[in-house]
Amino acid sequence: MPSRQRTARKTSQPVTAVEFKSAMRQVVSPVAVIAAQKGNTRAGLTATAVCSATADPPTILVCINRSSRAESMITGSGAFSVNFLHEGQSGIARLFSMPKLDSDARFAEGVWTRGVTGSPLLQGAISAFDCQVIETVPCGTHSIFLGRVVAVGSAEASPLLYRDGFFQRLAMG
Ligand SMILES: Cc1cc2nc3c(=O)[nH]c(=O)nc-3n(C[C@H](O)[C@H](O)[C@H](O)COP(=O)(O)O)c2cc1C
């Protein structure tokens, strides 16, 4: 049972960003690091706006703020990786969401290799997807990238989750 019942208000007023964010805070999301590389330069950020778009052909959707360094790296390289984190990797999630922290400091934690597309892949991630950009859709402050999955890997582990401003673990049972 919900602890506090809230209903959608009936009004012709547009929904504000504050109201939208407040409702989204209640949603549980898996946490991923999206990464891209061009030449010797790499960039990445922590993201929850990630989902499977279609399995046939295998395609992933990510929403990336245009002001982030990763957005221009994905646009420049035409590729990105999606690395879903396990519950022991909240430190990596914090590093990749720390504003102004340079890429070398972000990639200092964890073991990173390069995928088929050249994008950085995190060893030991719960699931890692190496993707070629097939479509970019501008949407407000963000770019929505659709990525065709060209390589994939996964490991048995419990996921890192995010809800209401905190990293959380999956409670079993
Ligand atoms: C839990 C969490 C989820 C996030 N999800 C997204 C996301 O889906 N897309 C996005 O563009 N930024 C997202 N961010 C914000 C970026 O990780 C953050 O702004 C990062 O510093 C951007 O990289 P930059 O400093 O290189 O610009 C999220 C941050 C956190 C903590």
Image (cartoon, helix red, strand yellow):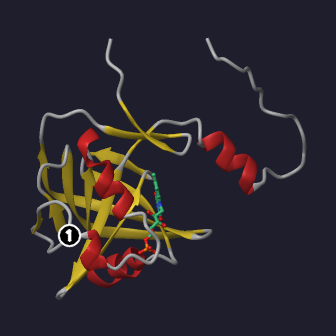
Q: Residue furthest right?
A: 12
Q: Quadrant of residue 11?
A: top right
Residue in the foreground of this view, choosing between 155 and 61:
155
| Residue 79 at least partly seen | no
In the rendered view of the protein, which quadrant contains the C terminus? top left
| Residue 125 at least partly seen | yes
Residue in view at x 14 percent, y 52 percent: 152
In the figure, is residue 93 to the left or right of 42?
right
Residue in view at x 68 percent, y 44 percent: 22
Relative to 33, does residue 77 appear above or below in the rendering? below
Residue in view at x 60 percent, y 43 percent: 24
Q: Quadrant of residue 97?
A: bottom left
**Residue matched to label 1:** 108
Residue 51 percent coordinates (x, y): 38, 47
Mark 1 secondary-structure assignment: loop
In the figure, is residue 116 to the left or right of 47?
left
Q: Amino acid at mark 1?
A: Ala
How many numbered marks appear? 1
In the rendered view of the protein, which quadrant contains the N terminus? top right
Relative to 55, does residue 116 appear above or below in the rendering? below
Residue 29 percent coordinates (x, y): 44, 40
Residue in view at x 40 percent, y 79 percent: 69
In the figure, is residue 111 to the left or right of 34?
left
Residue 56 percent coordinates (x, y): 25, 46
Residue 151 percent coordinates (x, y): 12, 57
Density class for disc 1 (Cα within 10 Å; few <14, some 14-19, many ≥20) is: few
In the figure, is residue 32 to the left or right of 83?
right
